[in-house]
Amino acid sequence: GGWSKEPGKPGAAAQADVKKWLGSVFLPSNLPTSVSKDYLTTRKWAFLHDTAANVGGFCAGAAIGGALGVNPIWGGAAMATFNLIRERTCQAAGFAISFATPKADKNPRAWMLAGELMEQVGGIADAGAALVPGALLPLALTSGLLRTAANGMKGAAMANIGPRQAVADNLGEVGAKNGNQSFVACFTGAMLGLGLTTALKGAFGGALSPMVV
């Protein structure tokens, strides 16, 4: 449906159908009255932020993978032990930060900034694992601690944004549409990270290219 029978109009009708479908998937219904005035501006920023963050996340993963590949000690039982230590360390960090996160409601901007900075330092630590593979365990543990703490801080700081923006008692729909937007941003960031890392590998090598990106 939606295709015009008038000559020269099918393309425009199809574009309108696609635009309508995209809106139904990625935006809350009844915009702009169903959300606060700052919703679209906030989500545009969040999309760019999530895309860039996932470029960095892909590169951090590539760096860790490179460090594991060049250091044969991290295989088999050692790899399982490595993952176990990292997971338990991150769980402990998440438990510890939970006692401080209630303060984020009183000063969310500062907590958001601190969380962002910690997350960036964690990404750099991951990328450094490819340059110093012998220090993989301490670097990975450090990055895991920082990222876990950062996620807790940022999550607490952002907790009130959704309820405030969902002005039509539509928090569930707003959350779902925000999740759809984040999915596209994550996929886009991962593809950009892969493309940039691959493009720079010839000039900088497999170990350094994730750090450069």
Image (cartoon, helix red, strand yellow):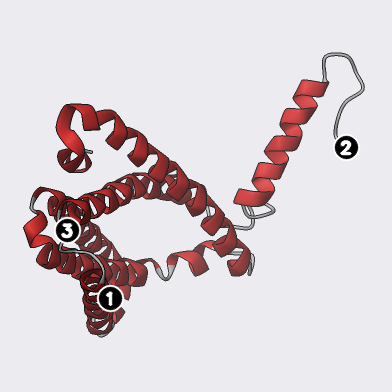
Query: Mark 3 highlights which residue?
Result: 72
Q: Is residue 171 above or below residue 211?
A: below
Three-letter code, disc 2 = Gly
Tell me whether the residue at label 1 lies in contact with that at label 2, contact meaning CB atoms closer than 8 angstroms.
no
- Tell whether 150 sits left or right of 125: right
The percent position of residue 18, horizontal first and vertical second, equals: 71, 36
Name the residue at 39% across, 44% down: 189
Find numbered disc 1 in the image and state the secondary structure of the residue it sits on: helix
Task: Name the residue at 22% across, 28% down.
Answer: 202
User: Would you identify the image quadrant in which residue 206 lies?
Assistant: top left
Residue at horizontal 24 percent and vertical 79 percent from the top: 97
Packing grade of label 3 (10 A; few <14, some 14-19, many >=20) is few
Circle 2 is placed at which residue position? Answer: 1
Q: CA distance from mark 1 to mark 3?
A: 21 Å
x 41%, y 70%: residue:
159
Mark 2–mark 3 CB contact (< 8 Å): no
Q: Nearer the viewer, mark 2 or mark 3?
A: 3
Marking on residue 87: 1
Which numbered disc flags the more N-terminal residue, 2 or 3?
Answer: 2
Query: Callout 3: helix, strand or loop?
Result: loop
Q: Which numbered disc covers residue 4?
A: none
Viewer can see residue 41: no
